[in-house]
Image (cartoon, grey):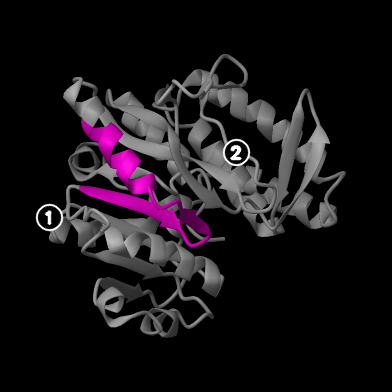
Amino acid sequence: MDKIYADVIPIIVTYNPDRETLLASLSQLLPQVKTLVIIDNASNTDIAAIVRSLKAEEYNKIKLIALERNFGVGKAYNAGISIARSLNAAFVLLLDHDSIPESDMLEKLYGVFGYLEGQGKAVCVVGPRYRDLATAQLSQFVRINQFRMTRLVCDDITHYVQTDFLISSGSLISIKSLDQIGDMDEDLFIDHIDTEWCFRAKSKGFEMYGICHAFMQHALGDRQIRIWWGRWRSIPFHQPFRYYYMFRNSVLLWQRPYMPVAWKRADKLRTLCFIFFFTIFSPNRLANLRMMLKGLKDGLHKQMGKL
């Protein structure tokens, strides 16, 4: 029988999800929790119908909140966090609709979080590694040095590493740390929401850890190509509107004092590389360039919210 983590509430944010991927995620999590929250950002997909297809004992665990329009990832996560607080949860597990946790992911995250707290660590969040659904490539945790991201080593004897940030999907966050750090920045809408929150947490003295032996499947972009750029890399392609948010939110974060100088340097270099790569190799190069330039302009003018 699966262990029940009664003090953990998973929050899945959906926007036109793939039905089978969402069902796979639900099938992994529902046996392990008492309540699971789905916040839907006005999908064209009938999320309620997907939920109704579940067995009664699974269906009864789900709280589905259908937002009247797409408010973005940050506001959706915050809506779920508010529900978790009202239910006196100790943790939230954030998930995108294109992530599928492995069956023991929650157990491992929860166990290491408790161990780190017992060691006196100021831990606020732990997260898994993810396998890309398209390439099966396994992610690595990173730290920021002066100009770039340094990949951290996970091996058979390393159970966790202290990292500078984690992606939001798969993150197990304590409610008590959210109470001190604050919730997600809704004004960013999408992209860099996790980056901003992690560095805001670090500025308040909190730590975050990547759990080397906890895994999930996760989709990156609409498609990917593999190129040599100092090392072999899988580069995800997105729809042009995503580059608007990536660039705008980068510029917004460059102007915030709690964001580390080293991250700002590394992100500026990354932004230059994006302009070069996605305006040469992408099939939507002109649309991408227009969105990137608009993002840069709006970021400088501190334009926030939805495009």
Q: Which residue position is annotated with label 2?
A: 138
- Binning the other alpha carbons within 10 Å of mark 1 as few (below 14), some (14 to 19) or many (20 upward) gives few
The quarter of the picture where residue 257 lies is top left
- Binning the other alpha carbons within 10 Å of mark 2 as few (below 14), some (14 to 19) or many (20 upward) gives some
Q: CA distance from mark 2 to mark 1?
A: 34 Å
- Above or below, 110 relative to 187: above
- Picture coordinates of residue 21, whole percent (x, y): 53, 66
In reply to whether residue 109 is colored magenta, the answer given is yes
- Picture coordinates of residue 133, whole percent (x, y): 62, 53
The quarter of the picture where residue 63 lies is bottom left
- Above or below, 111 relative to 59: above
Residue shown at 53% from the left, 43% from the top: 130
Q: Is residue 17 visible?
A: no
Q: Which residue position is annotated with label 1?
A: 88
In which quadrant will I find the N terminus?
A: bottom left
Residue shown at 46% from the left, 70% from the top: 23
Task: Specify the segment rendered in magenta.
Answer: 91-114
